[in-house]
Amino acid sequence: MTAEIICVGTELLLGDIVNTNAQFLSRELAELGITVLHQQVVGDNPARLRAIVEEAKQRSDLLVFSGGLGPTADDLTKETVAEVFGDPLHFDETEWDKIVAFFARTGRTPSENNRKQAMVPARGHKLPNDHGTAPGAWFEDGPHAAALLPGVPREMKAMWTEQVRPLLQKRQNCTIHSMTLRVLGGESSIAAKAAPLFESENPTAAIYCKTGESEIRVTARAATEAGAEALCAEHVARFRAVLGDNAYDVDVPGLAYTVVRLLKERGLHVTTAESCTGGLVAEKLTDVPGASEVFGFGFVTYAETAKSRLLGVDPALIERCNVVSGPVAVAMARGALAASGADLAIGITGLAGPGGALPGKPVGTVYLAGADARTGQARLVRLAIGGYQERSVIRARAALYALDMIRRMTLGLAPDGGVVLDPGQDVPEL
């Protein structure tokens, strides 16, 4: 099945509202194994809207609309789609009673123009809206169908889940299951390593690029939920075999959730010593419910004096090697470990920019160190996150790599680049 998403509203074209509905609908359709061929945004203009609906109907099996179901004269989505699908609208007394009751609950009385919201398809059917005043609509004309949803994201998402998704699952005549594999690294490198796996037709696999990592959404169709889930799991396992340690988890919101889970499972505590990231790693950890079981506190030592006073970093070391250096990062991690009594620690120092470049150390140079109380070892990685990256991106990527270092130390995995240092070993300047 092919689909097209059409979002209606002049406010979208003017940039007054961010079109999050299209993103949500695209992902939901992909999860159902429905291919989205086009996305369009059109203003509140009946002629242009009609032209778009006619064109979309010719080339796609399913049209999904958001917006244009309100009571004002320029809310014409339902009327326009009804004309193109040849399905007249009629007044639904039940819907009108719901609208009147909805207004009454807030001490208001509906206007006469609200009556147009109670108009529903004669041959198709309404899509009840228990979250607002505007019911949606479902139209069919031969092999073509259209689902009309409100533009308010809260209402749209609820109606999609309650009304439209079950309809589409029934039309697909199968069960759809999806799993999302999260992988550290860029889209191009991942696609190059796992190219044949993206060519599969069932399960399908799609990649989505994030800051410093990517998501691979695997979707399978089968006669039963168990069968579809098994197909997904097998395909995810193939990806993990190819991508190795960088494929870190399935169906989690982010790396911090994986890190907290692993620390809990092993009964470990971690602390952080951050300079250029300014507490971002600690923030990501404490965003995870239950993080207090594995993270007690961290250090934000932005100034050189703070690194010395709170972490015990020797001022002479800073003077000799520069504050942005491998030896200082290692000293920060070891100092945090000693001061906190934790099992693991990370230290981060770097140049987040936009200014401050040093000879041989451009903006985006970050030193990331880990210290492990269990082995006495330290790890050191020099990151090059520069180029045209913004300060916020450099900091976000550095925090992500720091979380990955915690993950790797927790699991006993080799660092992704860099070196492992035994107790008493000199720290190299990478």
Image (cartoon, rainbow, N blue to C red):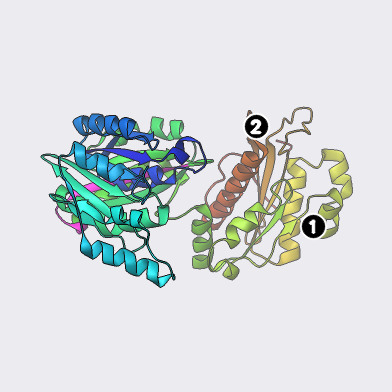
The magenta region covers 214-226
Point out residue 325 in the picture as x, y percentages from the top left corner: 76, 40
Q: Residue at x 44, y 38 (%)?
A: 10
Label 2's element? loop
Using the image, determine if residue 25 lies above or below residue 4: below
The rendered magenta stretch, by its main secondary structure, is classed as: strand
Residue 88 is left or right of residue 13, and the answer is: left
Q: Is residue 247 magenta?
A: no
Res. 150 in view = yes
Mark 1: give few (<14), some (14-19) or many (20+) Cα within 10 Å.
many
In this view, 305 is above or below 65: below
Q: Farthest left residue?
A: 142
Question: Which amino acid, by three-letter code, is at mark 1?
Answer: Leu
347 vs 129: above or below = above
Marks 2/1 in contact by CB < 8 Å: the verdict is no
Name the residue located 49 percent from the left edge and 57 percent from the top edge: 258
**N-term-proximal mark, 2 vs 1:** 1
One can see residue 165 in this view: no
Is label 1 in a helix, a strand or a loop? helix
Residue denoted by label 2 = 386
- Which residue: 55% across, 49% down? 404
**Tag 2: residue type?**
Gly
Residue marked by disc 1? 311
Q: Residues within 10 Å of mark 2 (few under 14, many from 20)?
A: many
Residue closer to the observer: 33 or 260: 33
Q: Answer with left or right where residue 173 lies relative to residue 98.
A: left
Q: Which mark is residue 52?
A: none
In the depicted view, which residue is nearer to us: 60 or 418?
A: 60
Classify residue 143 as left or right of residue 39: left
